Structure formats: structure tokens, C-alpha cells
Amino acid sequence: MSAPITGDAFSACLDDSHHAFREVCARFAREEIAPHAQAWEEAETFPRELYLKAAEAGVLGPGLPEEYGGGGGDLFHMVVSTEELLRGGSTGVVVGLGSLEIALPPIMVLGTEEQRQRYLPPVLAGEKISALAITEPGAGSDVSGVTTRATREGDHYRLTGTKIFVTSGVRADQLTLLARTSDDPHGGLTFFVVPGDSEGLTVSRAIKKTGWRASDTAELSLDGVRVPVSARLGEEGTGFLCLMQTFLRERMYLAAIGTATAEVCYEDAATYVKQRETFGRPIVKHQVVRHRLADMAGRVLAAKALVYHTVGRALRDEATPPEVALTKNQAADCAEWVCREAVQLLGGMGYCRETRAEVLSRDARLLNIGGGTREIMNEIAGRAFL
């Protein structure tokens, strides 16, 4: 039985460069991630050298400008990369390598050419780890609640506050950090690039998580961290609009993770039910199992079609925040439902850490939380009715 959602249903959205890049990413996942994924999940980390290997292989920074060391291409290259790297069996590794996908865009949008040349190439070469620091204990999806303060002192700023849920934050070499430069809820937000070894910047704790275990997640404390004015991105107060653009990219990235997660779990379940026997025959011979597979396939097809549609519109600058929000919700819902059904079909094996479905079923739960909760996504879409 072939998996109907893994054929050429979406190939019309891609060109030869995407298909060639898919092969590169598939090989990297097969050779560099899959053999170690289980150990890295247990260790809750992966080696820094994997960034260098990813850069050398050409899979680090897909869709980011080649002139700064990125892979070039477009958003579909990011989607293709996500789909293939997830086959390595660890979302944590994928999002750890991919933390630059959300940390670098504010530098590209707001930074001067000198700042781009300074901050982008080392990260895209795999030499430095970059992280985005937005969320705070009292400010998540609603960034107007950000309280981390940046106070101007001549040719420097002093940064004081706390950031939490920072992906790659434990070992980040540089942070793209949002701070408040005035009391205006939205107009008072400004981005800075903060070195990870800055005096006064400490990792308060490495957060233990249900899923995404191979990626480090940090709570950070900033106690009078001193950065030069040259570390500020754009003018004071320009952070909010840039952040909204960053959120759109992040949410499309998370949507791609969702459909890729669901697709892998579906395929693993479809393979297993042909091998596992009950009552003297493969369990795929039972109608209830085939119907469950059909439901899984249908949901993945629908969610993946929506993701590809939204990414295509984004490439034409047509995608709106409400449709991106709804796309993320649909992909996240699909991932959670399909992963649960896959674990059920795998039975006891689905509850063992040695299977991809077990790992990905835990990982999928975060998709309706990270990058904006499901409720906030619905609110963004719901406001379109007003």
C-alpha cells in the first residue's frame, strides 16, 4: 500500500531547484540526524558541530540570501527542508538548527548593510548560534506586555529584564532581542542584537520540556546588559511592525512542521499495519484500520494543501495575517490528531521512545502553543469579521 500523500500531489508547486534541494535535505536527515536522533532526544541536546555540517551540506538557512551565506531560494525551500529534516525523527533538532529562521529576519529587514555583514554570515556558516528573544514571563502572544527595558546612556543602551522560552537560548552566541525603549505599548518596541557572552546576561535555567527535547530552551536574565547603539536594529520604536512580519514567517514555518509531522506519522503507521499481525493476518486487513488510515491521509492532504497555498500566496505578497493564522491552526490540529491516531495504530510500539511516532506525538503538542497560541490565532482571524 503506497501512501497517497507522499507522491506528486504537490509537485506542481515546486520547480527543479526545490526537488534537487529535497534530495540534499533527505540525505542529510538520513545520514546526519536519524542515526543519532534517539540519543540526542535522551540527552536533550545535539552537538554544535551539526550546525557546521548543515551549513557545509547547504541545508542551513534555506530561503535566506546567498550573499550572506544563506541557501538562497524562497519559502518553498524552507518548506521542503522542514519536510525532509523531520524524517530524521526529532523536531527538536530541526527547530534548533532552524532558530535562525526567526532570529535573522529582523536583522535583514531593519539592519544596515554593515549590520547584515556583521551578524548574518557567521550564523549562516554554522559558526554561531542565533536565537530570537521575545517572550517574557508576563508577555507571550501579546507583545504589548513586553517589559524588558532598554535605556539609552550616550552611545550605549542598558538592557534589564527577563526573557523566557527562547529556543537555542542556552547556548546562543547572539540574540535578536526585543526591548522597550518607550512606554508606548506598540510604538515603544525596538530590536537589538545582543552577544550571548554579554556581562549581565545569564541563563537562569534550561527549561525541561515535554517535547522538542533535543532543542535547548532558556529563560534568560538581563541585569544592566550594556550594548552599543550600533547593536540597535533600525530606529527606536520600529520593532513591532518588523515583529509582525517575523511572526508571519514563523507561523508558516510552524505550519510546515505540523504537516510534515503528520505526514511522517501517517507513513510510519501505514507501514506498520502491513507488518503487524493479529488473528493470523496483517491488521491492515481489518476495515477499521483502513478507514482510520483514510481519515489520516485525508487530513494531511487537506492541511498540506492549505500550507502550500498560503506559502504560494506569501511568495506573491498576498498572504494576510488571518489566513496565515488559520493555516497554522489547521496544520497544528492535523499534527495532533494524526499523531494520536498513529500512536494508537502502532499500539505498544507507539508508546516506546524508539519510534518516531512517540517522539513526534509529543512534539506536535507545542504547535498550538508556540508562535502564538491557537486562541490568539483565532482572534487574529476573528477580527477580520469586525
Image: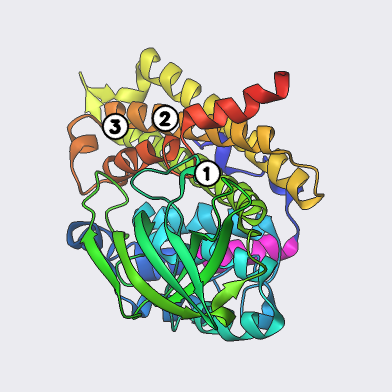
Of tags 2 and 1, the one toward the viewer is 1
User: Does the rendering let one see residue 198?
Assistant: yes
**Cα–Cα gap, marks 2 and 1:** 35 Å
Q: Identify the mark nearer the N-term, 1 or 3.
A: 1
Question: Where is residue 15 shown, x and y percent of the image?
Answer: 76, 58
Q: Name the residue under label 3.
A: 343
Question: Is 247 positioned to the left or the right of 12 in the image?
Answer: left
Which stretch did the figure color magenta?
Answer: 16-27
Query: Residue flagged by tag 3: what amino acid is it?
Result: Val
**Cα–Cα gap, marks 1 and 3:** 39 Å
Q: Residue at x 20, y 18 (%)?
A: 279
Q: Mark 1 points at which residue?
A: 144
Secondary structure mainly formed by the magenta segment? helix
Of tags 1 and 3, the one toward the viewer is 1
Q: Identify the mark nearer the N-term, 3 or 2.
A: 2
State the image quarter where residue 19 is shown.
bottom right
- Judged from this view, the residue extending furthest toward the front is 154
Question: Where is residue 303 shown, x and y percent of the image?
Answer: 58, 32
Query: Residue 338: which numbered mark, if any?
Result: 2
